[in-house]
Amino acid sequence: MEQQLSQLLEEVIGDRVSGAAQVTRKAAGLISQWIEQTSKPEPENFLELGMMLIQGQPSMAPVINLVNDVLLAMHQAQENGLKAKQGLFEFIHGFTERQSSTLESTIAAALPLVKPGDRIATHSYSSTVRDILLGAKRAGVAFQAIITEGRPNLESRTLAHELSSGGIKVEFVTDMGLFPLMDSIDKVFLGADAVTSSTLVNKAGTCAIAARCRQLGMPCYAFVTQEKFLAPQLEPLFKIVEHSPTEVWGGAPDGVTVRNIYFGRTQLDALSGLACEQGLLRPAQVEALIAKRPVSGLLTG
């Protein structure tokens, strides 16, 4: 692999701070570079790079889906007798446009849920939640955001800066510090890194937040685009992995095992609803959409 491609690959698989949508855009840029440089843009040749991306970010469904969609585009180009490079460049260019379009539709579905005077909590960093809240502010809705810090990498500091720069009043708390405040919160907005037919995968602690919302009768919504919907055939490629313990506690004493788990699963029926470009959905509707997703046989063999 060319040095430039290797550097781009390291940037993608080494990103532990950005949201799934941002990481996937980086992966699309890498694939575009690969298409430009390779002399044989065929499915079997792309598979090695695709598996590197998946194994480097195994907890992010959009990366898995991007690799799957590129393979499907290659198969289709072969079947239609199209020039592979031209078809793939068009696909990658269209990917960026589709990502923007589906995000806009998701934001449109979410904006009516932001009411004047709301205190809205969110957990960790989600660019989708960020864009919803900034969109509501631009629409003239006055509300407050309560943001958890996102241990261990504190990625939510970026979100707090982005929202406050956009004129939104922000309260910033530790991850567990959210719970004593929940009596004063009106609703919770969540992002996601993956959605399966029965679960939402998001920052560790999301399940507890959703459970507390249910106890309080508080709305708890997740906002995603369908690029995060993971077909059952691709679920074996998806893994919630543990990361370096030194991110949590460097130099821990002997006898102390430090575990660093970024993500956890939350049952879809624990949420008030899941909004995507199709609107606000119930679990059965999510399952039906996921079942329709096509899958490349090269990823299931």
Image (tube, rainbow, N blue to C red):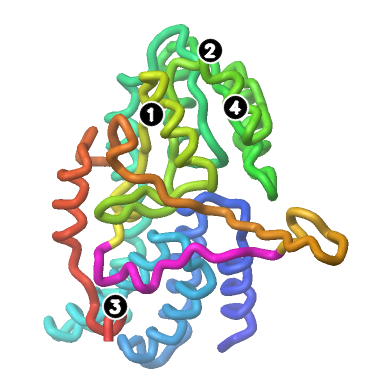
In the depicted structure, whether residue 95 falls above or below residue 199: below
User: Callout 2 environment at 10 Å: few (<14), some (14 to 19), or many (20+)?
Assistant: few
CB under 8 Å between callouts 2 and 3? Answer: no
Q: Is there CB contact under 8 Å for labels 4 and 3?
A: no
Residue 286 x %, y %: 21, 47
Sequence-earlier tag: 2 or 1 = 2
Spot the residue most to the top: 117
Horizontal relation, residue 166 to residue 210: left or right? right
Which badge, 4 or 3, is on the more N-terminal residue? 3
Q: Looking at the picture, which amino acid does disc 4 mark?
A: Leu
Identify the mark nearer the N-term, 4 or 2. Answer: 4
Q: Which mark is residue 220?
A: 1
- Can the viewer see residue 97 in this picture? no
Q: Are marks 4 and 1 in contact (CB under 8 Å)?
A: no
Gap in angstroms between the C-alphas marked 4 and 3:
42 Å
Question: In the image, what residue occupies the spot 19% across and 51% down?
Answer: 287
The residue beneath circle 4 is: 178
Q: Which residue is mark 2?
A: 184
Q: Amino acid at mark 3?
A: Leu
The one of 73 and 187 positioned closer to us in this rendering: 187
Disc number lying in front (4 or 3): 4
Q: Position of residue 45 (x, y in %)?
A: 38, 90
Image-based side of 87 in relation to 21, left or right: left
Region of the chain picked out in magenta, as a range: 231-244
Choose the circle earlier in sequence order: 2 or 3.
3
Q: Are marks 2 and 1 in contact (CB under 8 Å)?
A: no
Pointer 3 and pointer 1: residues touching (CB < 8 Å)?
Answer: no
Q: Quadrant of the N terminus?
A: bottom right
In this rendered view, identify the residue nearer to me: 65 or 154: 154
Left or right position of 248 against 278: right
Magenta stretch encompasses residue 233: yes
